[in-house]
Image: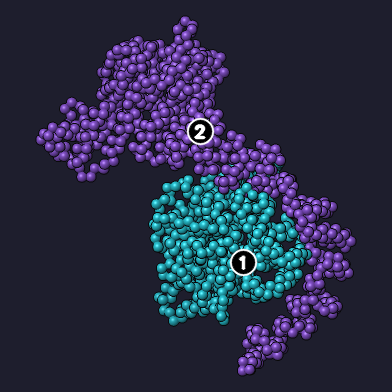
Chain colours: A cyan, B purple
Amino acid sequence: MAFPHRPDAPELPDFSMLKRLARDQLIYLLEQQHEVDKLYKVESKPAVSSSEQLCFLVRPRIKNMRYIANLVNADKLAGRTRKYKVIFSPQKFYACEMVLEEEGIYGDVSCDEWAFSLLPLDVDLLSMELPEFFRDYFLEGDQRWINTVAQALHLLSTLYGPFPNCYGIGRCAKMSYELWRKLEDEEDGETKGRRPEIGHIFLLDRDMDFVTALCSQVVYEGLVDDTFRIKCGSVDFGPEVTSSDKSLKVLLNAEDKVFNEIRNEHFSNVFGFLSQKARNLQAQYDRRRGMDIKQMKNFVSQELKGLKQEHRLLSLHIGACESIMKKKTKQDFQELIKTEHALLEGFNIRESTSYIEEHIDRQVSPIESLRLMCLLSITENGLIPKDYRSLKTQYLQSYGPEHLLTFSNLRRAGLLTEQAPGDTLTAVESKVSKLVTDKAAGKITDAFSSLAKRSNFRAISKKLNLIPRVDGEYDLKVPRDMAYVFSGAYVPLSCRIIEQVLERRSWQGLDEVVRLLNCSELAFTDMTKEDKASSESLRLILVVFLGGCTFSEISALRFLGREKGYRFIFLTTAVTNSARLMEAMSEVKA
Amino acid sequence: MGHRKYELYSMDWDLKEELRDCLVAAAPYGGPIALLRNPWRKEKAASVRPVLEIYSASGMPLASLLWKSGPVVSLGWSAEEELLCVQEDGVVLVYGLHGDFRRHFSMGNEVLQNRVLDARIFHTEFGSGVAILTGAHRFTLSANVGDLKLRRMPEVPGLQSAPSCWTTLCQDRVAHILLAVGPDLYLLDHAACSSVTPPGLAPGVSSFLQMAVSFTYRHLALFTDTGYIWMGTASLKEKLCEFNCNIRAPPKQMVWCSRPRSKERAVVVAWERRLMVVGDAPESIQFVLDEDSYLVPELDGVRIFSRSTHEFLHEVPVASEEIFKIASMAPGALLLEAQKEYEKESQKADEYLREIQELGQLTQAVQQCIEAAGHEHRPDMQKSLLRAASFGKCFLDRFPPDSFVRMCQDLRVLNAVRDYHIGIPLTYSQYKQLTIQVLLDRLVLRRLYPLAIQICEYLRLPEVQGVSRILAHWACYKVQQKDVSDEDVARAINQKLGDTPGVSYSDIAARAYGCGRTELAIKLLEYEPRSGEQVPLLLKMKRSKLALSKAIESGDTDLVFTVLLHLKNELNRGDFFMTLRNQPMALSLYRQFCKYQELETLKDLYNQDDNHQELGSFHIRASYAAEERIEGRVAALQTAADAFYKAKNEFAAKATEDQMRLLRLQRRLEDELGGRFLDLSLHDTVTTLILGGHNKRAEQLARDFRIPDKRLWWLKLTALADLEDWEELEKFSKSKKSPIGYLPFVEICMKQHNKYEAKKYTSRVGPEQKVKALLLVGDVAQAADVAIEHRNEAELSLVLSHCTGATDGATADKIQRARAQAQKK
């Protein structure tokens, strides 16, 4: 269990610096400048506070601006004067100031920026905590966060040295990369001559691989996220887990020794591991018997605290496991997983389709139904027209007509589409992809973008061997490839791409895959000639997920790292999962 | 008291006028000299226009222009080396070093009415100020002409005539005025006028003829009608010394002459033909003036210039005095001697050296020589001192070389700028105070670009602070040369600047635009590598469309948005939309904005694009977000459906029409049955009807909306189980053959924990699901039998996994046996 790293695995850089930097800046902004004494959450209800000054720490969104404007205007009506301060994080947008101006309160508030873009959630995981990135970019085509990404990369390279090898795929990856390079060029000298600490950087757009993100997660950390939702590296375990009447907020990271050993494990192993652990713990407690006073004193002062801590964690995770099992068996999890695997492998499509239909008819869950529909669409290169219509009709009848807009969103993002008939498509497609690269043809691009977004999953899967051929049972206790994160049924596409490129140190030989991903112009490699990088740093790889990554992908790459003697570091706009992706695309009645 | 005077330049400025007939202003730190023949002082009307002339400190002409404005009372230089000319009417005209007019400002109405009697330009830490004495004997001042705030000082009670002398003081960051009326001194701050008395002032003073404040505003000197000079702190709290020179004639000028951190206090007093240096020593030093001369106070001494010469008078620095004092035995002096002897190849060199070493003063000697070299004006003296230092250094093990190296560099720079052609006679102390950056600025101001660049390169200054900055200034000067064509200027600038880091082409372009050369500005912007930097200027030049594409190129959405709002105000709506149409990135950005701020505009945008799909979505959203009344909602949906038809999206159109029907129906249901139906999904509407016992209505609805059988069965099954209406459920199950099979019946009953009812349906479950059904109701034994009968391996293991411990032991054995049998076969 809990595979150790190879002894020559490189050390991870120290990311606590980022935290300190951000914290110090915020403390400065809050305390020195505004003397904050109480914090409220910005919600749609008015804040009740008698303070003389209000300070808002917000994302630069128009919605938030209107909230502030309403509050200030209400104060004005009531004849109240206070000071207002808006701190934008990670940056201020002109559009926000415009709204403040249009609402007539620009003169009443003062603005500040908190340039906080990288939150180290764990020793190897940095999150920008921008869940809105996904919808903003992949649905609305809003590129505002690309600049933020570039700034974050720039910060990393000033702190941890330049990145000698850069790879990437996807439009957003390319734009972010180019913008980042521009920033580096403008401020040259700072990183030049520094020894690189991290040898490779890989940027990947989420829309390169929707399939992986849409699958049910079965590694422990992913499953906890799917079931309880991990927020900012911590999770709220409810009474059913804590077996008391209180909820408990638990930090989940490498510090938690128990969690650290099971986080990357397939769920089927976790229970066994935990009970083994419990027995060991009991044995350690039992050693007390037959101790003399001196030994006992030693035991109490040195070991007991650690054991108690471990005991606490153990019971929490056992509770979590039980709760997960209960939930999953109720919904016939096995059946669901079976359908997913069938979709991934591409057999029994009819059966899967009727499974999905039943899922909708029974109103199991709007988000789950949607997820299965999308998974079907992407793996099959779009739904056949008859299914496309009937599934949508069923869905609208079950979950409400406003989802007509959800479907329009999904179509635009290429998540749920209709199969175009026949071969004529390839001709249109090649024309369109030519147009896509031509900036002036924006409007046509817009109209045809859903056409150009054919997923070609089946072909890619074949090319990259994503469905492992298994003879006999896949041993989940001793995984042999990254497919273990999906019970041995599927190697995550995103991780496979990364593996392949790192192996080749370029995109060479992957032309066909790149073409199938509709990224002929959007895959890049950039290597610096001078070789100052140590062999250790060359085995450190920063993977940047634009639009979010899942814990399953993280686990898969951690596994790959252990196999090959690499260490991966993850930078994501936010940690995501299938439900979050679907929610981002859903239209809900306000 | 050690003071010395040496010549800086012999002036060949070929003055037509006597200095005494001119208004004279010389800037500190070796700055330029401005002369304006003062015709207004004479009674004769000014028939000839006077000439304003500006010279470098070495007398090289920098500018000469005919004075066409009103009578000037006073001239002075600002800290930025701008010439301020105070006119009689209180208007201050500002000129550049090269006689270029910059701007003007007025000192206020009160000054205009009462005319200017006298004016002073003074320097504070904030910048340069102007103080004015009006004809009404009132003072007005501004402490910083860069940020003009006029301050009228309080009245001096009983003041009938002009004060005999006055000056500005600067204390605690506030400018004051000190004035003398007869035997009395008054201090004006902006609140009050207070009478002050210098401590220890000799008796018998009936009037003050001159007063002088030191360069740093720390000290004050007063010259009385008894020929007595009082010297003390500017706060008038302490007397430092006094001197009686026995000359009662009012001096022409009196200035302080002391160096920073020196304990010596000295004042230089000038009369027509006599110059006197007085301090706390009983004797004064006197010089005869052959010519009409003018004194310029400096940080560490006094410059004295006349028609023919320009000299510097200062207190001899300690290091120099130690070395050059006659028969000095100071280590530096000995080292200098030693080096001289060494050059003569005399053994005395060794004797001197040994003498210093025996006293252990060699380090000190070297330091002394280095320091003294800095204070020498003549390069040969500098050299011999530095040579001595270098010689001494050879006998020291660990003498850090940087002080020597830095002094060599500094002196090289100083000698270069002191050159006659450049004419900036800075001393070492002044140079250090001014800093190299400011010196470079001043060279740039004099358009001495090559020298400035040479200095930067020589001192190896970082490019951004040094060479690039100077090149940028050069370029800004270049764009003002109107006689050269745009192409040539742009090319010349690009050739010289290339992509030197730190040079901002957009700044240069802004300058070009400022001179009215828009085309040149655009050409220059092309060289700007950061497209983001091009945008603000392009907007200013009204090239908004170009700005938009540059902003998009920069990848900075914020910038794009800025341009968009500009465009929106600048263009009419149609053109604006057309522009957006060609820029998808800008378009999506603007849509985002509209979605929250300008919904109507969003609709127009879709309309003009004939984007019916999005229009449809827009109205759908409106149907539940914006509209409240049911009629309004239906109308919005109708518009949406029409749009969807136009978009050839029949599916969406039909779905929308269905929704219209549903809404109307839900409304009717609410009216007729009460309860809440609006906004439920079709499925939930039917469920609600069944739960409410309106089975007929439910069936009607299912037919009307063509709900598929499968769904209807699921729906009814769930609803009836929820109602625990087992009878009705059984009836329903028998109404016809279930399209979803009977396993769901078992499942749902079990969900309601009704095993009894569940068991009723197990028999009707099809064979392939039978095992599952039996397991659900907990009949493991029978499940085992069925599985064995089916000979299905998967089913067998499923049952086995349900066998728990003791109770199902027998069943488990049975299965194992069956398995074994199956394997045998």
Q: Residue at x 48, y 7 (%)?
A: B47
Tell me the quarter of the picture where residue B502 sits. Answer: top left
Q: Which residue is mark 2?
A: B487
Residue toward you, A206 or B82: A206
Residue matched to label 1 = A457
Query: Rounded to the nearest whole Å, what is the CA distance between mark 2 and mark 1?
Result: 55 Å
- Dots 2 and 1 on the same chain: no
- Under tag 2, what secondary structure? helix
Amino acid tagged 2: Glu
Secondary structure under badge 1? helix
Residue type at numbered disc 1: Phe
Q: Nearer the viewer, residue B216 or A563?
A: A563
Residue shown at the point (21%, 40%) measured from the top left: B393
Relative to A288, does residue B601 appear above or below in the rendering? above
Locate residue B141 relative to residue B586 in the image: left or right. Answer: left
* Residue A59 can be seen in this image: no
